[in-house]
Image (cartoon, rainbow, N blue to C red):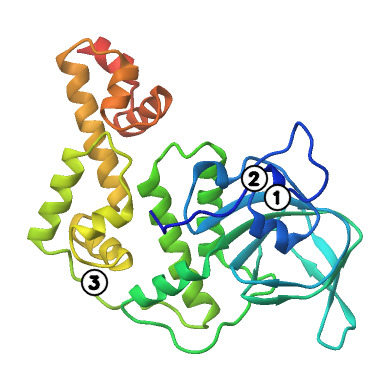
Amino acid sequence: MLGETSFLSGDEQLNGPLDSTAKRQSTEISDLLGYSALRRPSSVDLGWKKFAIERRTILAGEKPEVKVQHHFLILWDVRVAEGESAYHSGRFSPYKKYPNTITTCLPGIRPAVRTRFNHEVIVGALHPDFILRMEEELDKRPSGGFRPLYGTDAPDLRNLLRLLLKESETGGPCGTLYADSLMTALATRLLYTVRSEKASATSRISPLPPRPLRRVLEHMRANLSANLDLVTLAAETGYSRAHFLRTFRAATGQTPHRYLIELRLEKARTLLATGAMPLIDIAAECGFSSHAHLTSAFRSRFGVSPSAYRREL
């Protein structure tokens, strides 16, 4: 997992009156945005550590400045967002944010804002301890101070946020290892982006050596039905999470999550061929979150559903 404590959340933390439709949500995101409405389920329900992501509507009105401690990425969604933001002089200046661009809010002060219309946003919040730990794990640490983004086109950050949002809003079907890997990639990309330095694309990554690779693969095979996480697999090698991800991919050509899915699918195919075990039991035995998740992954990999595969044997 990504840390010892999860984001504080609960119905009692909602902005606005509590009612029967109240949903659990991130307190940190609520504090940042002020009065806002949750549009879809929050990642808080999944118990993710050190990271939260939500789809929100920022309601029109004036919001005072607030002190923030987390690293926030705001992905502007649906339509152009216009309003006014205060500066140190206390004077307000207009802003305009376009859909699919990203604004960051780094630890410090979020200035007062005024909006005449609602804003649709996707917000990711990263705990400062997580960012610090990721920075310590980088092979090459970026230098310089943090540079905020103001409605910037950042495709890598945008795509990672949307993948995490999809995983969150569908109930986390791909498991902890997948979410951990995306969060690690997001934090790493954010560190390079806000420090005005590109990650090296030309430096060669050495593959994970055979012995630690063998330990990782043996652990995967022995725990196919478990909800494996990135920290556990990286611990088998003695490497940091970020370094483990890079060296594993260099050694296998796949991410740890993708390799694990391949192992699970091979076991599922064996079980389909050797017995009459119900599909729901095969899904559980192979570590898939549901019968539907198994069916989707199996069809994507083999071009046929598990039921059809069994009938054709």
Q: Quadrant of residue 122?
A: bottom right
Residue identified by numbered label 2:
10
**First in sequence: mark 1 or mark 3?**
1
Q: Earlier in the sequence, mark 3 or mark 2?
A: 2
Determine contact: label 3, label 2, CB under 8 Å: no
The residue under label 3 is which amino acid type?
Ile
Image vertical order of residue 281 relative to residue 71, above or below: above
User: Residue placed at 20% from the left, 55% from the top?
Assistant: 252
- Residue at figure coordinates x 26%, y 43% from the top left: 260
What amino acid is at disc 1? Gln
Residue 196, position in %: x, y?
A: 52, 83
Which of the 4 image quarters holds residue 28? bottom right
Question: Residue 13 — which label?
Answer: 1
Work out whether 268 lies above or below 54: above
Q: Label 2 is placed on what type of residue?
A: Gly
The relative height of residue 197 versus residue 117 in the rendered view (above or below) is below
Question: Which marked residue is nearer to the observer: mark 1 or mark 3?
Answer: 1
As helix, strand or loop, the secondary structure at mark 3 comes to loop
* Residue at image coords 74%, 48%: 14
Q: Secondary structure at mark 2?
A: loop
Local packing at callout 2 (Cα closer than 10 Å; few below 14, some 14-19, many 20+) is some
Residue 100 seen in the figure: no
Query: How far apart in space, not on screen, are marks 3 and 2 (Cα)?
Result: 43 Å
Name the residue nearer the viewer: 298 or 221: 221
- Viewer-proximal residue among 12 and 200: 12
Whole-percent x, y for residue 191 in the image: 48, 75
Q: Are marks 2 and 1 in contact (CB under 8 Å)?
A: yes
The 10 Å Cα crowd at callout 1, few under 14, some 14 to 19, many 20 or more, is some
Q: Identify the residue at image location x=78%, y=75%.
A: 111
Q: Which residue is mark 3?
A: 205
